[in-house]
Amino acid sequence: MNKKITAAITAVHGVVPPNKLTNKDLEKMVDTNDEWIVSRTGIKERRIIEKGKALSDLGAEIVEGICKKRGISPLELDIVIVATVTGDHRFPSTSNIICDKAGATNAWGFDVNAACSGFLFALTTGQQFIENQSAKKVLVIGGDIMSSIVDYTDRSTCIIFGDGAGGVLLEPNEEGLGIQDSIMRVDGSGKEYLVQQAGGSLEPITKENVETPAMYIHQEGATVFKFAVTNMADVSAEIMERNHLTADDVAWLVPHQANLRIIDATARRMGLSKDKVMINIQKYGNTTSGTIPLCLWEWEDQLKKGDNLVLAAFGGGFTWGAVYLKWAY
Ligand code: UT7
């Protein structure tokens, strides 16, 4: 009898730009202070991409890094899926550009827009191609250049976001490792609370709106916070329950890094101690689709084959979800 094919992560890589934007720097730009930012969000600094570079540059480095680690050629990649809300252009897709820059010329691909849950949506999309055996190597990238849509005069958003990207390679596994379960949710009635209003088909760029707040991220922080705390904790608890996982069974929570208080609430709800939670928000802030793969990249050395990981996110849209996977190497 043929063994069930699961989709397993077989390599990880992450890239952040070298330039740091610290809380002290922000104190000179808007009416804020280090103490407020750290106590309300947990963030100390974030990375900002250099002029002339874009998500595809980070993405191409990720493809190269992953192929090197795995000892394969970019020509062996079947599909490249990119989760982002800040691709190089509205079109063509950033996946296209990454494949060209990295020499993954046998791959096809596309971009996925699910805001901060983007990486999980892209990961579960990639999983389908592996499980139905239409692809053997699917590279999933999550990343955002949030500095391209942040208004650096708006203290309620500019302190939160940063630039960065990470990615994973998905390959077939016959040992039962890899992605075990996922729960994905959307609620479009939350669209107004976290949105870039202009630049789409509803409100195209015009002379009138080009230098208005409509061009930038708008977030009603307290409202988004309320939904994020509840939904990220609920979906994480739900995926544990339906897979009969106790807190002892879970080796790591890999949470979206939006706010330390949201991460803490999710870990508490799951009954996990802090040493089982990946947290790097202090260094990178909220990189939207980049947060979860950047965590996997930074913790890769500590992960063991068979470890149970719960990945969880909440973001604009609203979108949210959780993935339960068994680490495969
Ligand atoms: O990534 C996906 C989804 N996004 C999230 O999950 C983010 C969710 N939201 C949050 O993380 C938090 O709501 C924020 C960090 C954005 C804001 O924290 P908060 O504790 O909810 O603050 P608030 O917006 O309720 O504002 C509290 C006070 C206000 O002053 P008053 O009206 O009480 O006098 C704000 O004007 O803090 C003020 N404030 C600031 N003060 C210093 C807002 N931003 C700042 C700032 N520095 N940067």
Image (tube, rainbow, N blue to C red):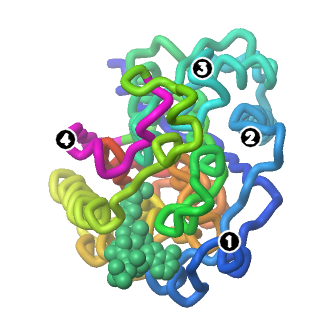
Q: CA distance from mark 2 to mark 4?
A: 33 Å
Label drawn at residue 189 = 4
Residue 32, by quadrant, is bottom right
Q: CA distance from mark 4 to mark 1?
A: 33 Å
Kind of residue at disc 1: Met
- Of tags 3 and 1, the one toward the viewer is 1
- Residue drawn at x 45%, y 63% is 258
- Residue drawn at x 60%, y 12% is 108
Q: CA distance from mark 3 to mark 1?
A: 33 Å
- The crowd level at tag 4 (other Cα within 10 Å; few <14, some 14-19, many 20+) is few
- The crowd level at tag 2 (other Cα within 10 Å; few <14, some 14-19, many 20+) is many
Residues marked 4 and 1 touching at CB (< 8 Å): no
Instruction: Check the image and name the residue furthest to the front.
Output: 208
Kind of residue at disc 3: Ser
Q: Is residue 203 left or right of residue 236?
A: right
Label drawn at residue 93 = 3
- The crowd level at tag 1 (other Cα within 10 Å; few <14, some 14-19, many 20+) is some
- Of tags 2 and 1, the one toward the viewer is 1
Label 2 sits on residue: 58
- The crowd level at tag 3 (other Cα within 10 Å; few <14, some 14-19, many 20+) is some
Kind of residue at disc 2: Leu
**Location of residue 315 in the rendering, given as x and y in whole percent from the top left corner:** 37, 50
Label 1 sits on residue: 29
- Of tags 2 and 3, the one toward the viewer is 3
